[in-house]
Image: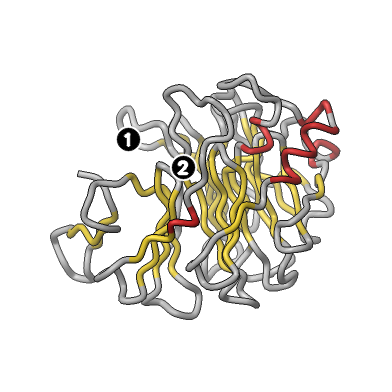
Amino acid sequence: MTGLFRLRLGGDRWERIGPGDAPVQVWAVTVHPTRPRTLLAGTSPVGVWRSDDAGATWRFAPSSVMPDRMEMGQFVNRVMRIAVDPAHQDEIYAALEVCGVIRSLDGGETWTDCSADLIARSERAPHLRSAILTASPSEGMLDAHALCVSPADPRAVLLAVRMGLFRSEDRAETWRDLEVGRFSPVTYGRDIRVSPHDPRTLYACLSTSANGATGSIVRSRDLGRSWARFNHGHAVRSTMMAVAPHPRDPAMVFGAARKGQVFGTLDGGESWRETRLPGNAGMVYALAVG
């Protein structure tokens, strides 16, 4: 069974709450920051659903459907991350793998494509071209994995794609390369998060590739203008997939690598502990801290 499931506080049984009646793969879920009964769900194939009653009923946004820009073979494009601008809460962004970025300015009712400049950048700059699954050199710039918006920089969007980290200052209309390669030997962008304690602090996951042999967590304290390696002391043996700052304790940050390594610091990055997921757990895509 596919879809979105809920476990009520104190309950012992999961219940399917949608979205919709037909089976659908859900890859991204976001709770609205000030309207906790409003949920947004992103799917594969690409689409966005919205509920305003905590999942009892859902509405699908037909304009969120983005056609494949290139022949993808067996790969089905999907919504990887949905982010609400905390200062303008009807402005919502979604990162699509492998289909770029879409934006809603009306709370998720209608969506527009914001990928034209990503494609143009790949056409202008040889170092931003990458074709793995397709023959299109724009594939890498459209391979979007995560995005976020900081309350310290409203209407600016930060984006992690295969080719690095990018920033838009005009609601995702145009994009600027943050040139993270100046600070890191690996640049494949997998995750990017805003610190819940300091809106100028960002965390990002960088690696060599989707199935790479190493990766890292980097931190910026100036909204992405500069970066430094944050995790240390342990060998990361696969792609760093997810980073999760603790919502209440600024000294605690955690990260997860694709093949099951989990890393954590309790002292603001001074020291790190590594644990492994049990058994043969792998193919890690997400991590959360409560």
Judge left or right: residue 9 versus residue 180.
Answer: left
Q: Which dot marks residue 278?
A: 1
Residue at the image point whose x is 85% and y is 38% from the top: 182
For image coordinates 71% across by 34% down, the residue present is 163
Considering depth in this image, is 53 or 268 the residue closer to the camera?
Answer: 53
Which residue shows up at 65% across the image and 45% down it? 160
Q: Name which residue type carries label 2.
A: Arg
Q: Which of 180 and 17 is in front in this view?
A: 17
Q: Mark 1 and mark 2 in contact? Answer it, CB < 8 Å.
A: no
Q: Which residue is drawn at 56% across and 21% down?
A: 133
Residue under label 2: 78
Left or right: where 178 falls relative to 22: right
- Above or below: residue 175 compared with residue 153: above
Could you tell me the amino acid type at mark 1? Pro
Q: Looking at the image, is mark 1 or mark 2 nearer the viewer?
A: 2
Judge the density around disc 2: few (<14), some (14-19), many (≥20) Cα neighbours within 10 Å: many
Hey, which quadrant is residue 93 in on the image? Answer: bottom right
30 in relation to 248, above or below: above
Q: Where is residue 210 in the image (x, y as percent from the top left)?
A: 56, 28
Residue 193 in the image: above or below residue 121 = below
Name the quadrant of the N terminus: top left
Q: Label for residue 84?
A: none
Q: How crowded is mark 1: few (under 14 residues within 10 Å), some or many (20 or more)?
A: few
